[in-house]
């Protein structure tokens, strides 16, 4: 009576989902793994004990032996595949972004509203990260008073080679847009994007620094630095009228050698957010079992995409860009 | 084809095992929960979806629908129950201590040797804790040079009301004895126990401070402070000839209020070692599936018990006590 | 043969200068203390062994037994008094701001240029703070690569009761403007000011968040939060292409009680920058003895004031304001 | 009207005293510098503006133009020179150890008692270190409850080449013996010394680990590790019944590069205790001016030496050694 899951996409992120679902989440059976590269799908299926491997994502969604779907395929396939899941009535955990087009998000939202129930959970896994959860709880308990500002820093070792100028905003920043919205429980009204001169022209992406304003007037500052070089590092601070709360990243030990105290950064997001992914996927499985959706919804995916679109506009114009969500359907 | 597990003992520790096995470990089915207090067994069984609840631990071990056993019942039952598991040919994860009597440990070891394979894993979960694992790897890679000393600090908020004078040595310290042996890959030759004056006579247990010497001449210092009041806090530092490595405890956020920066301690071991327990139980399940035992063996349980016995002797005599393990059977 | 110093202003800052000069700086004699409140001048003179006390700052500057002057009187007196020192040919350590008017700064600069030598040192003491000095050295050694961004956070417990809306920019931020210019060795081209909604309307000043761009295209972000409540806290991070360097504030001990680890913030700037003030004043005295000026010059005071003026303009307009320094005289 | 100081000893420590006295302490004039190596004495005198340089320490003490003496010459000269200062009625700041012979300390104490006033201050500068001062205040305020244990760690990069086996106890440990006595306000009754096997036989000194017991039954544990390799590092933790207080060493910045966060250790004690030395010497000068002695007395020097003697005995015997101070003269 396990939930039989079809996994679409067997790249780095898909492989990690396969590992988590097969080794860390009871009550779930990995039914099939699908990838355009069938060899990769087979390798992952074999390593995780999935029953089938294939290359056709539509077949996975249509498969009657698949109860629920995880989408970890390329970004531009997310929305059409998720929409097919809705139409098939199957719960889906869809990696972010839902779409880089806000209007495509609205299209999917319309489908979900028509279906009459939330079937889509967006992979904004930070909502399950113990550090962000603790920050949100501290804030909700009033410990730091009403929020004034939130400072967010997202740093990767190195941008992927296919990174282009605005992908810092459309690809990396949505995690920040979503988590600040989630922690503060607030929507945005505007975004202003700044970009420092980036001397190493050979690298794909310069950093961006963004100042967002919420409807309540709070500032949400976001640094996206995809070529930060020194490590994968995500920081956040929520500043309230009575104090502030600061995230701490997992560190297991410190070493003292050569006149130095040293702690280590991970090279990518997996060690930093391993627990968040496990808890997210566990919550998703549990939500399917209980019928009570959790985590980020398609609406949240839309909010992130609209914010990114405004960010791209601000980068182009050099001035603030407005963010105006449509009216929120009652479903969300 | 899940491993069907029988859980003996449904107290704090047993309840945690039930939760972990049912929610965090795929491939395991909680078959039955057993406790002298049948109501407690039933409550845990219901909460975790276990099929049966009962009060007779021997019946659990004898049950043909039980493939493997977890023992989390009172300390003095550990050895006889584990021995029964060996005789029934069933893998068992036995909470520490295996026995507070080293000779009873040897008796069990004889049974396991006779059985010809390792069936017992002792619940020294720190061997799976990411911080200790990282420390051991750092040491093994030679980063800090040959080991000279290891400093260990074990602090509880408050000793249980049934704590008596020497339980700091027999009940709490075995975790330290085992993990230092494990990290250093070294056995002990002696132990000297010191005890500070404890002014609050109303509390059950004064701290102890122990200096152990390994066969290779390294010092292993252990503070056991069961009434430390301020929090559950386990610290460790391995000092080598080239440097040192220090454990870090999980901290998810820091708060800045009232002229203070504040981080939080847990009130007991569960948050500190949640990941260690999950990884331990997962490794145990995996070891059953693959037939390759992992973790602390009955021999390790014996070593810890013998060290504790010597500690009790040193506390009584006020001088150093020798520790001499018997010859190690080839099984270990 | 000590340098005989006249101190103008005996408020909190002046009293601290008197203490430092009399107890921590050899080779300096406090000749006179002057304050509009003559009783306060006398009290400080008595406590520090100064020979004279008075109420007329011009008399201090004219006094032949005064070799050098420290100005710690109200802000609007800084420039005229410093100019009188220049005309009297006396070295002067002038508290910041030199003036809140950039043109008044230029007027004073003209006087100093006419005098043909640097006589004015501005009290931007952070240039002597060991943490900023270490940051600057780390950056200069190339450890973190070319600079991309600098993040600066300035937080006071509570704004003074006379604080008005723009004083966060004109009064607090100049320290940040100057130190980032100093660490990065770069001038600004623009500033954009944001302000979050501040719910506690009873407090004098809401925070501001500013994004400055240097001529080389680096971003310098500055949070000024004069009602931060939780403590006096100054943070800074310089982000380069290879890594980042982060300031650490002095912390002497940590306490573990009540399920918490606690370290303490000072209530104002004095403990945080005690060493910076001592080193600044020592360097000033040494500079007088050797004739080689150090520290922030009148030109640096002008740069800070011009930046603040642009910040005020940006706050009013809601858009970026340009910063364009006049040509720098050869003296600086 | 400055205090005219004669400095005996111009080695590393003496040079540092000359620098501190001439550049950081008002009210003090360095009258003469004396060293067996006259060239070294001259170099230091010139660098610091001292009036005379010489090679005869007795002449310094006898010199009528010398008001007070600092002794930083080799250890075995401390006691005779300090005694001559007493007989000349001159205040003396004597580097530790007063003597490595407890009976020689008593001889000097007799001389000081005869003189009828405290003239000797021992250079246990840690009593002025802000971290230890804060620890002592926290303890005195009752924040951590009655003391149970104090853990002390003293680590040097590398032992001097003249280091022999017991100098860890006689030369390094006295700082620890004194500061724990000072913070706890308690005398010792016994000491037990342990020594780990030290594999690198080429190095002069193996570490020692000592467990001392105070008269009140508290444990004071001391690690002396003169070949710790990784840095100059002094740590301390006072464990009370309600919590603990932990020293923090000065750290000015942290660097993030190469998948690491890095902070830096000093190579020797000077950066770590720069502030302690400055405050100690300032307090000494002030004590001469006011006639009210401060800091560690000859009695404290005796207590440290007697403890070290017991430590050497314990190292030899392998068992605990008693520590029994003579009756304390009323002068102290």
Image (spheres, coloured by chain):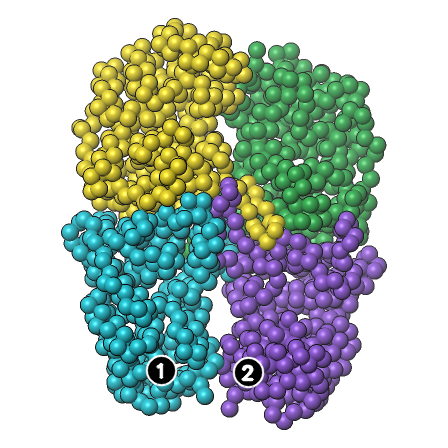
Chain colours: A yellow, B green, C cyan, D purple
Seen in the picture, residue A78 relative to B204 is either above or below; the reply is above
Within 10 angstroms of label 1, few (less than 14), some, or many (20 or more) residues?
Answer: many
Q: Residue at x 37, y 34 (%)?
A: A204
Q: Chain of mark 2?
A: D
Location of the C terminus of chain C (image quadrant): bottom left
- The chain letter for the residue carrying disc 1 is C
Callout 2: few (<14), some (14-19), or many (20+) C-alpha neighbours within 10 Å?
some
Rendered image quadrant of residue B215: top right
Horizontal side of C8 relative to A2 (left or right) equals left
The answer to which of A32 and C297 lies nearer the viewer is C297
Image x and y of residue B69, in percent: 64, 21
Question: Which residue was labeled with disc 2?
Answer: D49
Give the CA separation, mark 2 to mark 1. Answer: 23 Å
Q: Residue at x 25, y 23 (%)?
A: A105
Which quadrant holds residue A32? top left
- Location of residue D157 with respect to C39 vertically, above or below: above
Image mark for residue D309: none
Q: Are marks 2 and 1 in contact (CB under 8 Å)?
A: no
User: Mark 1 highlights which residue?
Assistant: C68
Q: Residue furthest left?
A: C317
Residue C304: image location, x then y, percent: 28, 62
């Amino acid at each position: 009576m396990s939930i039989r899951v079809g996994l679409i996409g067997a790249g780095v992120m898909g492989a990690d989902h396969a590992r988590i679902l097969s080794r860390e989440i009871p009550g779930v059976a990995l039914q099939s793994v699908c990838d355009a590269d069938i060899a990769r799908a087979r390798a992952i299926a074999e390593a995780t004990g999935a029953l089938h491997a294939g290359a056709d994502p539509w077949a996975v969604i249509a498969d009657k032996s698949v109860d629920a779907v995880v989408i970890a395929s390329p970004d531009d396939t997310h929305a059409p595949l998720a929409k097919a899941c809705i139409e098939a009535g199957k719960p889906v955990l869809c990696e972010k972004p839902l779409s880089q087009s806000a209007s495509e998000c609205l299209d999917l939202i319309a489908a979900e509203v028509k279906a009459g129930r939330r079937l889509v959970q967006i992979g904004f896994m930070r909502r399950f990260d113990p550090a962000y959860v603790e920050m949100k709880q501290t804030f909700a308990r009033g410990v730091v008073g009403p929020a004034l500002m939130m400072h967010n820093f997202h740093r990767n070792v190195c941008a992927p080679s296919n990174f282009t100028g605005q992908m810092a905003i459309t690809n990396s920043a949505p995690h920040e847009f979503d988590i600040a919205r989630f922690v503060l429980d607030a929507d945005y009204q505007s975004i202003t994007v700044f970009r420092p001169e980036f001397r190493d022209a050979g690298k794909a992406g310069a950093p961006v620094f963004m100042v967002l304003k919420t409807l309540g007037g709070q500032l949400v500052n976001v640094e996206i630095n995809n070529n930060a070089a020194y490590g994968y590092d995500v920081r956040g601070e929520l500043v309230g009228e009575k104090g502030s709360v600061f995230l701490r990243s997992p560190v297991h030990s410190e070493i003292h050698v050569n006149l130095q105290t040293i702690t280590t950064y991970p090279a990518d997001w997996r060690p930093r957010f391993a627990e968040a992914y496990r808890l997210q996927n566990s919550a998703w499985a549990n939500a399917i079992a209980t019928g009570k959706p959790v985590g980020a919804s398609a609406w949240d995916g839309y909010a992130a995409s609209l914010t990114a679109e405004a960010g791209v506009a601000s980068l182009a114009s050099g001035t603030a860009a407005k963010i105006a969500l449509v009216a929120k359907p009652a479903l969300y």
